[in-house]
Image (tube, rainbow, N blue to C red):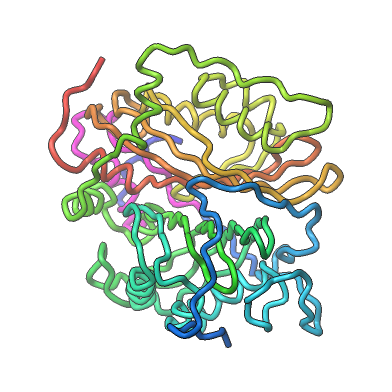
Amino acid sequence: MTTPSPSTDPKDAARSEISALGGRREAAAVRLPDEAPTLVQESAPAWSSAAPAPAAPGGSAWPPPRTMPTDFSIGIVPGTGQPKRPLDGVRRQPMRGYEEQYTDIVDYCVRVTDRIWEDQDVGYIYDTYAPGVRLHDDRGWKFGVESVVEGTIATINAFPDSRHYADDVIWAGDEDQGFVTSHRAINVGHQTGPWRYAPTPTRKPIRIWVIANCVSRENLFYEEWVQYNTAARLLQLGVDVPDAARQYAAAQPTMLDDHQQNEVDRLLAGRKPVRYELPSGDRFDVEHAVRALFHDLYNRRDFSAVDRAYAQGVRWHGTSNREGRGRSVVKGMARNLLATFPDLGLTVDEVYWMGNDDEGYSVSVRWSAAGTHRGLGLYGDATGKRVFLWGISQLYFREGRIVEDWSLFNEFDVLAQILGGPTEPTRL
């Protein structure tokens, strides 16, 4: 990833403007990628005061044990944007309380999204989201179904022809535990209405991908962690991303709590980040492999962990539509983040998966990290700001190695944390 070079082509305006962020030196400019193409692979029960909603399942802040599916029979048909399901619509797994038309949890996840976004039945949110739903996105934590309704209407108004093609759904759980789903979708459309960051419609197309991790039980979503890939959308609309981040920060200043800073404090305290413990037994352990990778790479700073975990020709898809192939690309992004935030510490918050040793594994990983903007890497001159990052990664293992990686983190919010408010002195 190199700093975009100046261009007189209007189509390149957004890319060249991004390098002009307040820095006096070329090397100190914010570095976001060139716009990279993402190929598109081309009624509910009513809860009332007389009939209370079911109890909330275990949330993902402290994830309970999950039952993992051991095959891919309930999943997405590759390249179709549609869930696998029998033609007769017979339910294929126990789903107590879910509307009868849904045959399995993937069918539920995809078709609820279609009804809300494709059919624009926004009111269906009231039937499928709990009144006190917890939503985690670039803007932080929000509570309540009305925040979901408000955000959905605002986005549909700005992008009324928006389409969401399901690219995959990784899931786990059961009707007693509640289900968890990691839904990756390709989002295409045009901005023909006013939007917060582009009040005058640009009429430009967008083609991005997003990930939403949800917890549901008995036809209701109780928690959602969503990465909107905001910076990619802004780049494609020609919006000045650093300027938009400053406005965003001014309207909603970010205050980091103790939980969001504690890993950084641990590293600064001088404790040696030891290598992750070796696996027990000879059988491939999915969760151990994932936790070892993230710990050794980001806390231990061991870039050779990529060689151990990834296939040589891995396909990698990153935030703001970065794309690449090979281990060097994965290492490059990790180096950039650690150079930008030299004291960065990372925690894996949740892991679940589907699959087996023969067919491979599809894994959802939600992680969080914190660091201090003290170095040159991605986001300009050091400001000394503490920054909280969180992300979702979908990793695809074959024969014990990752052959494809889709990873998003809250890059637009990270920019807002860095660029908003007064600059703090750099701590050496």
Residue 156 placement, left or right of 20 = right
Relative height, residue 281 to residue 58 (above, below): above
Q: Position of residue 344 (x, y in %)?
A: 40, 27
Residue at position x 40%, y 67% from top? Answer: 132
> Residue farthest to the right?
358
Residue at position x 51%, y 59% from top? Answer: 212
Q: Position of residue 121 (x, y in %)?
A: 46, 84
Quarter where residue 323 is shown: top right
Of residues 374 and 60, the one drawn nearer to the viewer in this rendering: 60
Q: Which residues are magenta?
A: 9-36
Q: Position of residue 63 (x, y in %)?
A: 56, 47
Looking at the image, can residue 120 be seen?
no
Of residues 159 and 272, the one drawn nearer to the viewer in this rendering: 272
Q: Is residue 12 magenta?
A: yes
Quarter where residue 290 is shown: top right
Residue at position x 36%, y 52% from top? Answer: 138
> Residue farthest to the bottom?
43
- Say which quadrant the C terminus sits in: top left
Q: Is residue 91 magenta?
A: no
Quarter where residue 416 is shown: top left
Relative height, residue 143 to residue 272 (above, below): below
